[in-house]
Image (spheres, rainbow, N blue to C red):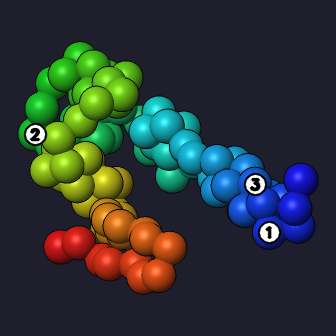
Amino acid sequence: MPRAAQARAARRTEQLGAIITLQELLRDRELTQETLADRLDRAQGNVSRTLRRSDLHLSTLREVIEAMGGELELIARFPDRAYAIG
């Protein structure tokens, strides 16, 4: 495999290692579903279902991340440029 392809594969592998589920993020932030439910003013069961989903609306994901105390950033990357989408 050419060196450039090896470098791209290594970067992609590194990026994939950084992928985390919302459940894992909640644990990493040392929060409980109950705490998050209170912050979102939702039932804990609804929060549990939301955290297990693999396909969320961006608005829902942003709301969950902000309730955890974070900020969601969306970046579109192209070979020649990256764009922050607001």
Q: Secondary structure at mark 3?
A: helix
Residue 5 percent coordinates (x, y): 78, 60
Towards the viewer: 23 or 78:
78
Report the residue at 31% width, 54% height from top: 65
Q: Residue at x 12, y 32 (%)?
A: 42
Q: Earlier in the sequence, mark 3 or mark 2?
A: 3
Crowd tier of the residue under label 3, counting other residues whose Cα lies within 10 Å: few below 14, some 14–19, many 20 or above: few
Viewer-closest of 39 and 10: 10
Residue 50 falls in image quadrant: top left
Q: In the image, what residue type sits under mark 3?
A: Ala
Q: Name the kind of residue labelled 2 in the image.
A: Asp
> According to the image, label 1 marks what residue?
4
Q: Are marks 2 and 1 in contact (CB under 8 Å)?
A: no
Tag 1 secondary structure: helix
Alpha carbon distance from label 3 to label 1:
9 Å
Q: Which residue is mark 2?
A: 41
The disc, 2 or 1, on the residue closer to the chain's N-terminal end is 1
At x 31%, y 40%, the residue is: 35
